[in-house]
Image (spheres, rainbow, N blue to C red):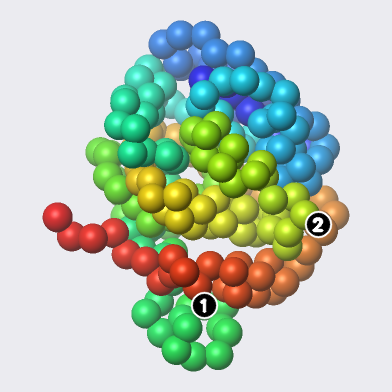
Amino acid sequence: MVYGVATREWEGWKECVLSWTSNASTFYPLITARNMPVLEAFQSIYKNTINPIIAYIHDDVTCYEKDWNLRILKEFEDPAVGLVGVAGGLGHGLPQMYKEPFHIPNLIRRDFISNMRDAEKHGHRFTGETDVAVLDGLALFVRRSVIDKWGGCPVDKKIGYFMYSESLCCEVRRQGLRIRLVGIDCLHLGGKSSGAPLPHSYEEEHRYFYDNNKDCLPYYVPLK
């Protein structure tokens, strides 16, 4: 595994990264992409590493759980797992999203779960492991082979700050792989990279996502 951190170098970013590295049970290399749009940063990290698992972690997320990495990597023992995260939804998109004209609220992440310190503010608290439909981008652990098959991160598409995680999740499911969520004890401070110039607007990204993922949306994790 390799840590891939995209940062705008806000004041406390190094302490956040240290919280992950110091609480892991073993050493992993770290590569940092500085002051780049998110997908360009992810692509740079992907191109400049060879590790089979890339840990894309926001520079404003603090990890409090000792040996968190063992839980994450255990999920990848199943070759059908392509992506693992720490916060996300059991469902993605409302049933009527393609039965009605384009409407951004229909693209919601449904039944959001996490073990963030403020989990109840965002949805429900969850400390275990489960399949999910979509992950928040705050921490994404992805198989390199998924990005290989994707043709690299889609820097030439209208995907960026707002919808990169959702787009990756759709691609993982399109490849026939599972998305897993692990309830790691963490906290997302949020907003530390806001204000940076963005290549696409909020509406442009949502519209592009809506138009280009009709084959795998809406989706809800099947009941077992």
In the rendered image, residue 19, in percent from the top left (x then y), is placed at 53, 22
Q: Amino acid at mark 2?
A: Leu
Could you say where residue 89 lies in the image, as x and y percent from the top left?
A: 38, 57
Q: Which residue is mark 1?
A: 105
Asked which secondary structure carries label 2, the reply is: loop
- Front residue of this view, candidates 110 and 156: 156
Image: 208 above or below 149: below
The image shows residue 6, relative to residue 223, as above or below, that is above
Disc 1 to disc 2, how far (Cα)? 21 Å
Q: Classify mark 1: residues with Cα within 10 Å, few (<14), some (14-19) or many (20+).
A: few
Question: Does the rendering let one see residue 108?
Answer: no
Q: Is residue 33 visible?
A: yes
Residue situated furthest top in the rendering: 26
In the picture, measured across the screen, residue 81 lies left or right of residue 172, that is left
The residue at which mark 2 appears reads as: 198
Q: Residue furthest bottom?
A: 100
The x and y percentages for residue 104 are 57, 77
* Amino acid identity at mark 1: Pro
